[in-house]
Amino acid sequence: MNLGFAPPTSSQYNTRDLDYDRTLDKRLGTLAGCRRPRPVPEVCSPSRHVLSKVQNYHISEDNPMRTYESWGRFPKVRHRTVVPIRWRDELPPLDAFDAPVLPHGMGRSYGDVCLNEDGVLLDTLPLNRFIHFDPEQGLLRCEAGVTLDQVLELVVPYGWFLPVTPGTKYVTVAGAVANDVHGKNHHHGGTFGRYVTRFELVRSDGRRYICSPEENPDLFRATIGGLGLTGLITWVEFRLKPIPSALIEEELIRFENLDEFFEISAQSDVDFEYTVAWVDCLAQGEHLGRGIFMRGNHADVPNALYPNSKRTLGVPVDFPEFVLNPISMKVFNTLYYHRMREKRKRVLVHYEPFFYPLDAVKNWNRIYGRRGMLQFQCVVPFGDHQEVIRAIIDRIARSRRASFLAVLKEFGDVPSPGLMSFPRPGVTLTLDFPYEGVPTMHLFDDLHALVRDAGGAFYPAKDTHMTPEEFRASYPQWETFTRFVDPHFSSSFWRRVMAR
Ligand SMILES: Cc1cc2nc3c(=O)[nH]c(=O)nc-3n(C[C@H](O)[C@H](O)[C@H](O)COP(=O)(O)OP(=O)(O)OC[C@H]3O[C@@H](n4cnc5c(N)ncnc54)[C@H](O)[C@@H]3O)c2cc1C
């Protein structure tokens, strides 16, 4: 099959064994399709008494061009200052601010884990340089703010891929470490942190730690899934995964209800590296939990190692709130479910639509209007998981409040390296809800009670609703973790779940 793309030859671009050097930034940036650091706005003072210490740094107020929100756009908070981090060897004194600091990546977390109300945000996107790429071994070292999109642009032509990827490629490498993200291959590959070989962590006292499973292993474990609270990651080294092509052999299966989902999921675990299901969360009765199961493997197709990152659509404005109503959502879900006439179909697709269907629409979160949205993601441990998931979906269907984005997947038992990692054996359900005030909060109270009673856990990267008690029950190791939290780092999420 000739797709009209040839893999690069080593003379076209060879990034092998390039040790870090600022003069290489531009060259590597261009090769990888990444941009120069984005301009950050004008100076304002972080606080009078630290000004003398930090005056050499370009301190910005909330950038009117960049909003520093989370992806759900809820809660809405104001930051005292935003400090762009341009060079990893010229950091501002992190203990000099009179408010806690928090690193911020692409802001693709949904809730408040990447927000720091009235505190200082460290904007890490200017740290966007590749440092070293070994295309023979599939080992990549890059700065913290490099995005997974930029990684793919660089490595796919050499026959490498991300070992684990979330449902968007617009996240930074350090953001993927700090939430120890998971993807459709969790049952095979575990979390992103498993592939991290080393990173540098800078603490607020200015000390720099190289962290790996051998060097500073406790700090390594605490920082993977450490929610940005253990210090600033400046660079990350991680292992890539070899792929025969950029294509995926995908199989789609329509299932009528939850029982069928669990049957297909059990059958798919061994033969399919990637599995996930879309669920129609508004269907009720005998169709409760119906949906479309998607499973796939990397396809062995010659001459098809090309990244493809063209965005086709965008949402230019916030949608008015009436657009997403129970009727429009029901219509959408029904049409989406019936888009597949046949029970089962096999297709050969590029990895982009398979892994990142939503990335094709820029700013799709605006569909939820100005009030934003809440995401709910839980994991229910194996045992009576089928009944619990059924009860959760039933509660959602009766509320008529769910949106079209509802995803169900079984996690495997591959252990996560992070002390606070979210994935664990069980079934994970993820849903978006338009934020409608009190009714949304009541619904969340009910969903949380069902998960809590089943001994389940909630994902901080998607959370706005966890109580301190629920956090401690979800992460019983939290007390050990607090020993590694940097005294000058904090987040809106952390203050919420640590409140007594
Ligand atoms: C459409 C969509 C689909 C998604 N699908 C999945 C999925 O399938 N699986 C999954 O696990 N997640 C998923 N997510 C969530 C997303 O992958 C995570 O929230 C990810 O951590 C976001 O990375 P970011 O660069 O945007 O970081 P941010 O959201 O900006 O920050 C996330 C955390 O990383 C910390 N951080 C950022 N940079 C640094 C640094 N340099 N040093 C230390 N800490 C740092 C922040 O303090 C914060 O705690 C999805 C999100 C979206 C929008």
Image (spheres, grey):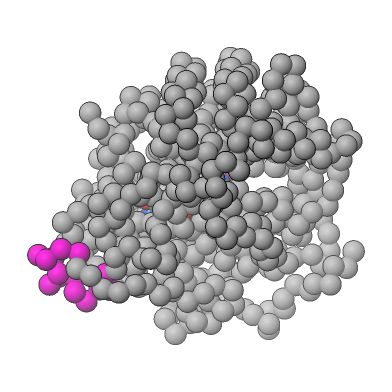
Residue 288 placed where, x, y %? 70, 21
- 179 or 138, nearer to the observer: 179
Depth check, front residue: 337 or 319: 319
Position of residue 427 in the picture relative to residue 270 (left or right): left
- Magenta segment includes 496: no
Q: Quadrant of the C terminus?
A: top left
Does residue 283 appear left or right of residue 467 in this picture? Answer: right
Which segment did they paint magenta? Answer: 46-59
Q: Residue 425: where, in percent of width, then height?
A: 56, 28
Q: State how many labels appear.
A: 0
Q: 361 or 1: nearer the eye? A: 361
In the picture, residue 432 is in which quadrant? top right
Is residue 106 shown to the viewer in this render? yes
Residue lying at the far left of the rendered structure: 49
In which quarter of the view is residue 419 placed? top left
In the displayed structure image, the side of residue 71 where residue 205 appears, left or right: left
- At horizontal 42% and vertical 29% (from top left) the residue drawn is 438
Image quarter of residue 430: top right
The vertical placement of 309 against 485, above or below, is below
Q: Which residue is drawn at 47% across and 35% down?
A: 436
Instruction: Answer yes or no: is residue 423 visible.
Output: no
In the image, residue 301 lies at what x, y percent?
A: 83, 59
Residue in the image at 46% along x and 16% along y: 453
Q: In which quarter of the image is the N terminus?
A: bottom right
Q: Nearer the viewer, residue 179 or 72?
A: 72
Q: From what the image shows, is residue 358 above or below residue 266?
A: below
What residue is drawn where x is 79% and y is 54%?
349
